[in-house]
Image: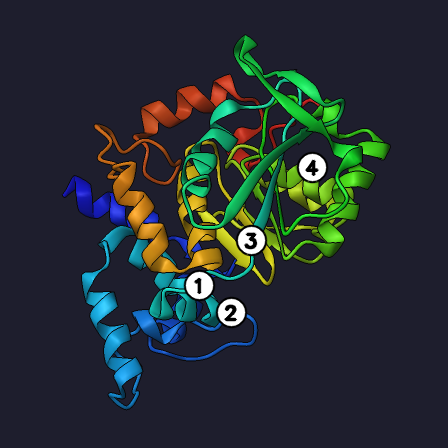
Amino acid sequence: MAQNKGNRSFRKFSQSTTSQDRLQPALRGRRHEETEMPEIFDETFPEELTETGSTRRRMMLMGGSAIAATAATRLLPESARAAVLGTAEKPIDFLFAIYPNGTLLDFAGPNEILSRIPNTKVRFASPEGGLVTLEKGVVFGPTEKLSDIDKVDVICVPGALNLSAMMKPEILGHVRRLSETARYVTSVCTGSIILAASGVLKGRRSACHWAFLNVLKDYGAIPDPARIVKDGRFMSGGGVTAGIDFGLAIAAELRGAQAAQEVQLLVQYDPQPPFHAGNPAEAPPAIRDVVYKKLPGSQNGLMRPVL
């Protein structure tokens, strides 16, 4: 029962802010602009059993259920092609934009995945470059200086409670500049608030830590409570631990579902939490009420980070 519950949570890889009803047509093989579900994962999609189609079905049956369920809902066709053909595209330049007081796991989790996928270079940049002191005194680095980065294929902004180092106009300007030319613009936890403040998420759906989710509205973004959200080339993960799920999902986008599942197995990502209290919708009411009191405004998704 616990495993099933975890899988249900993991499948909340969303393209919608309204209801699960919109997901059902996609799961039956319905196509959408920008967000077409790849046939590789669709058992019900009517396709001729060509050699390619048969290969796709065999790969789906062989895949791990957790990442397959996640990738199945929202991967692009190019990801499916990469998985089927086993090919790697051009090298991917992936940048984590980190900063003082940032949360380590927000980027350490996805980095554990992304640093293992083929032909991918992971870089770290910060407002001042050099060593960065994160939350709880953890020192990370050295890092590049954000202003020195010309362009990247993927930018990811992780989150924190204290976002002040990234909310300066010149730093937001660099985030916006890199986002304009990036193939994917991504975030984990409250990193989406930084992206939104830079202006790149206006009219776009985005995830965030549940306690801060509705702060996104202040910057014209559309809050989405799902654990992973994809809106065109914008992709985001929810709070802290969602970064690992996000890492697998973006790895599948970049290098195909097979490569993502291989890494999942390498790092033994097989979450089986002893409690199901990681989401307000599932947490016991007594636990939820205590946390709401500790995090003012969180009940309505309006807890304010330090800006």
Q: Would residue 114 be found to the left or right of residue 97 on screen?
A: left
Measured in 3D between alpha carbons, the distance from the residue under mark 4 to the one under mark 3, in whole angstroms, is 27 Å
Question: What whole-number distance in Å separates the C-alpha atoms at marks 4 and 2?
Answer: 24 Å
Q: Residue at x 55, y 42 (%)?
A: 121
In space, the residues marked 1 and 3 are separated at their CA atoms by: 23 Å
Mark 4 or mark 2: whose residue is earlier in sequence: 2
Residue kind at label 1, given as amino acid type: Arg
The C terminus lies in quadrant: top right
Q: In the structure shown, which secondary structural element does the residue marked by tag 4 occupy? A: helix
Quarter that holds the N terminus: top left
Q: Which residue is mark 1?
A: 74
Q: Position of residue 136 (x, y in %)?
A: 53, 10
Q: Which image quadrant for residue 190?
A: top right
Nearest to N terminus: mark 3 or mark 2: 2
Residue at the farthest left position:
1
Q: Which residue is mark 4?
A: 194
C-alpha gap between disc 1 and disc 2: 6 Å
- Amino acid type at image mark 4: Ile
**Which residue matches tag 3?**
91
Give the x, y percent position of residue 128: 76, 22
Instruction: Indicate which disc residue 35 carries.
Output: 2
Q: Are marks 1 and 2 in contact (CB under 8 Å)?
A: yes
